[in-house]
Amino acid sequence: MLGLGIDVGTTNTKVALVAAPRSAADGVVELLAVASAPTPGPADLDRVLRRLAVRALAVAARADAAEQARTPRPARPRRAAPVPLAVGVASMAETGVPLDARDRPLGPWLRWDGQRAAAEAAALADRLGATALFEATGVRPSAKVPLATLAWLAAHDPDRRGALARWAGVADLAALGLTGDLVTDHTLAGRSMAYRLPPADAALPTAFDADLLAEVGLRTEHLPRVAATGSVAGTVRPGAWVAAGLRAGTPVTVAGHDHAVGAWAAGVREPGSTADSIGTAEAVCTVLAADPVRAAVARAGMSLVRTVAGRPALLAGSSSAGAMVRWWLEHEAGGRAAEELFAAVAALPDDARPDRAAGPVVLPYVSGRQTPDPDPAARARVVGDRAAHDAVALTAAMVDGLALQARWMLDAQLALGAAADPTLRPDRLVVLGGPATRNAAWMRAKAELSPVPVRLVDCAEPVAAGAALLALHRAGLLDPDDPPVLPALPGLPGGEPLPPPHPDAGAALARFTRAARDPDDLAPTPGGHP
């Protein structure tokens, strides 16, 4: 069966057509077609999404026609154009736009990485208490949360705030174009600091919190309705989307926060399972059986969330994954193209790699460290002895730095989770993220420096594909007890076996965390970037 998935990311927007079996036992999920474009502004979002959907459906139709042409004519049935049975929308979180009374976007996205609302977040924390806010919402007060952004809007852009009739997150606005209804998902609402997170055994709210919204002069009717866990947002309405190739009445799901959607699609669904989702940012998410102590989670710089199915989970984020790679290519690559540079890193023999016990350490912090040991002043830099290493060897140290930061997040996360469940110990780390999982050098470092074996998801667009799967699931078209999972690579992207965790990984992590906490402790040498 076919599902259409939309992933509106920080950098790019993807629309994917997916063929899925009814259950994991019935076959393999297949990514039939993908169309992508740079993420547009709010006013252009619906038009760009429709154009991408047309392209994806056309690619799938051409591939199907080519397959039919290869089939002997007597055995060839006539097939109709591909038509999805459900549509799912995932997106970046903590990003949105005011809408006017006619649901037209007012200006550009107010994005999660804008860093504009730090003063407003601090004021909310002073007024309501940072600990109390985390206890209520599972989210730390910071510049990126929409509640602080809405306070900033009132203070710094009063005309736009005065014209605000409703507020839409990214996936919410996409679903509005499809269905005519403004609806969000609890995984996106839960990143806003305006949505109350109840205990793990309680039902999730279907609305934003009135008291928290009142702090910024808004009411619940200004925000989207929050779809009940497991439910669809609406159906495709007649009009432009039908002209783009969908059927009126097709179920539409706001699948949720991109990292959460990808994790579910990759099979990270039960307590004790862990996903490492990599895009512009990186998120490590561990599913739990019960909530840990919320104040301890806040001190670590993490968030307490719910999975797309409503289970408790810990979310640790780094804003610098793909963003760090871009920074590195601009500052340290010596003009070499990404593909050439990373191929050279992957080909390095072991004796040409920087010594993890004594060589340079790369701190992968383009714009601060969220967790562990939050440090908004942390910056990307090379520390330690770099003089004897060329750009290729230093790039090997950079991917080690990315892998060690993720390992540090995971170890801290597991320590927090073990307080609620002493038996917590994942048997593997599921890694997903199109370009990252095709980077053999990065994935080798991740496998060697992980505390447990890794599983690499074999899907170029796991979030878009996951949104399609989740839409089919919520429409009741998949086996409710055994929905399919995205396939895995048998080894590294180049075909080599995945290396097991390296016995010296713990020592490398200890050295990395020492440098992260005090970069001068490893005596930075000339050429590092402050």
Image (cartoon, rainbow, N blue to C red):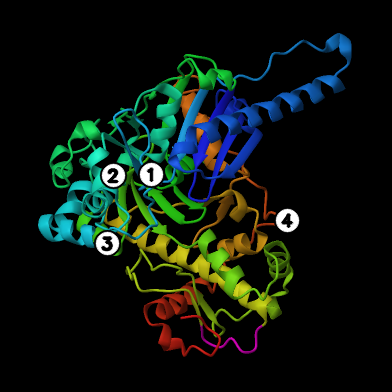
Secondary structure category for the residue under label 2 = helix
Residue 496: x %, y % from top left: 72, 57
Is residue 267 at least partly visible in the picture?
no
Q: What's under tag 2, amino acid-wise?
A: Arg
Question: Amino acid type of disc 3?
Answer: Ala
- Write the residue at 16% across / 60% down: 123
Spatial CA distance of label 4 from label 2 is: 50 Å
Residue 386 on the magenta segment = yes
- How far separated are the C-alphas under marks 4 and 3? 43 Å
- Residue 368 on the magenta segment: no
Q: Earlier in the sequence, mark 3 or mark 2?
A: 3
10 Å crowding of disc 1: few (<14), some (14-19), many (20+): few
For disc 4, the marked residue is: 494
First reached walking from the N terminus: tag 2 or tag 1: 1
Q: Are marks 2 and 1 in contact (CB under 8 Å)?
A: yes
Going by the numbered disc 1, the residue's amino acid type is Gly
Residue 139 vs 334, above or below: the answer is: above
Q: How many marks?
A: 4
Q: Which of marks 3 and 2 is in front?
A: 2
Residue under circle 1? Answer: 107
Q: Which mark is residue 160?
A: 2
In screen coordinates, is 422 left or right of 155? right
Write down the region rendered in magenta.
Answer: 383-389
SS at circle 3? helix
**Dot 4: element:** loop
What residue type is disc 4 on?
Gly
The residue singled out by tag 3 in the image is: 118
Q: What element carries label 1?
A: loop
